[in-house]
Amino acid sequence: MIVVTGATGNIGRPLTRALTEAGRQVTTVSRHPAEVPDGVRHVVADLADPAGLKSALDGAEALFLLLSGDLHALGASPADLIGEAAGSGVRRVVLLSTLGVVTRPFGKTRIAMRALEDTLRESGLEWSLLRPGGFASNALWWAESVRTRRVVAAPFGDVGVPIVDPADIAEVAAACLVDDRHHGGTYELTGPEVITPRQQTEAIAGALGSPVSFHELTREEAKAGMTRSMPAELADDTLDILGSPNPAELRVSPDVERVLGHAPRSFADWAAGHVAAFR
C-alpha cells in the first residue's frame, strides 16, 4: 500500500490516479475530507502533527511526502514525519523538495528543506528526491481575470523559466514509488523550454481560441497581491526568481524524460488540458 499526502492538490490527484490505474492500493491524506477514486482509502490528518499520520501509515510500504509551507514555520518539526514513517514500517519515501535547495540554498525555507532531505538520506529508508522548479498550474492565479476580463496581469512579462506540468511531477513520483531503480535518485524536474508570462498568455489564448491581453505589473503590485495568500518572505523569494532567474533556474533538465521515457509536457499542453478554468 502507498500513502499519498497532499492528496487534493495538483500533484496528489494525478499521482493517486496513476497509482490506482497501475493496480496499487492507495491511502490518500489531506487536512480536510475529500472525494477520492473508488477503492482508495482516505484519511484526514494534519501533517503538522506527525503522530496524526500514524493511522494512515498502517500497512504502508511507501510514502509520498508533500509538505505545505507552514511546516517550515517556527517550531515545526517535519523531520518527525520521517521518523514516524520508519517507525510504522514504511520502506520507501519519495520527498517533494524544491529546485531552490540548489539554486538559492540560503533562504529560510530552502535551508529547512535541505535539512529534511538530509534527514531522509540518513534515515535508513529507501528514498528519492524530487526537485521541481515553477509549476505550470501557477497560471491558475490568472483564471478569474481571464474569465472575466480576458487579461493576464503579472510581473516580469518577458522573463521566463522552464516551468513544469504537475502531471509530469506526479508521473515521476509514481515511478519512484514503485520502481526500485529510483532508490537514491535526485531528480530536477522542469518543463521542456523556458517560457515567459507573455508567452504563457499567448498559449492560454490559443487554447481558448480568443484573444487574451497581457498587463505587466510592477514588483510592488505583484507582491501586494501575493501576500494575500503567502508570507511576505516567500513572496519576495518567488519574485526574485521570476524577475532574475540564475543560470541554474534557466536550465532545462533532462530528468523527466530520463525517468518517464518521453519529453515533459509543454505549457501549451497544460493550457489545453485546463482550458475550462479560463473559459
Image: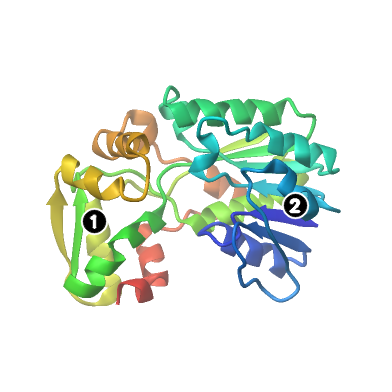
Report the quarter where the C terminus lies. bottom left
Q: Residues within 10 Å of mark 1 (few under 14, many from 20)?
A: some
Residue 251 seen anywhere in this rendered image of the structure: yes
Q: Quadrant of the N terminus?
A: bottom right
Q: Dot 2: few (<14), some (14–19), or many (≥20) neighbours within 10 Å?
A: some
| Residue 226 location (% of width, % of height) | 29, 48
Quarter where residue 272 is shown: bottom left
Q: Secondary structure at mark 2?
A: helix
Say which mark, if any, is on residue 199.
1
Please tell me the numbered disc located at residue 35: none
Q: Nearer the viewer, residue 125 or 190?
A: 125
With 37 as the anchor, is 240 left or right in this view? left
Vertical order, 180 against 262 (above or below): above
Q: What residue do we see at 63% from left, 35% from top? A: 78
Picture coordinates of residue 76, whole percent (x, y): 58, 34
* Residue marked by disc 2: 178
Residue in the picture at 32% in, 59% down? 141
Instruction: Indicate which disc, 1 or 2, sits on the residue closer to the N terminus.
Output: 2
Residues 191 and 111: in front is 111
Mark pair 1, 2: CA separation: 36 Å
Question: Residue at the location (37% across, 45% down)?
Answer: 230
Q: Residue at x 45, y 56 (%)?
A: 165
Residue 188 appears in the picture as rendered: no
On the image, the x and y values in percent for residue 109 come to 47, 31
Q: Amino acid at mark 2?
A: Val
Q: Nearer the viewer, residue 273 or 77?
A: 77
Against 247, residue 263 (above or below) is: below
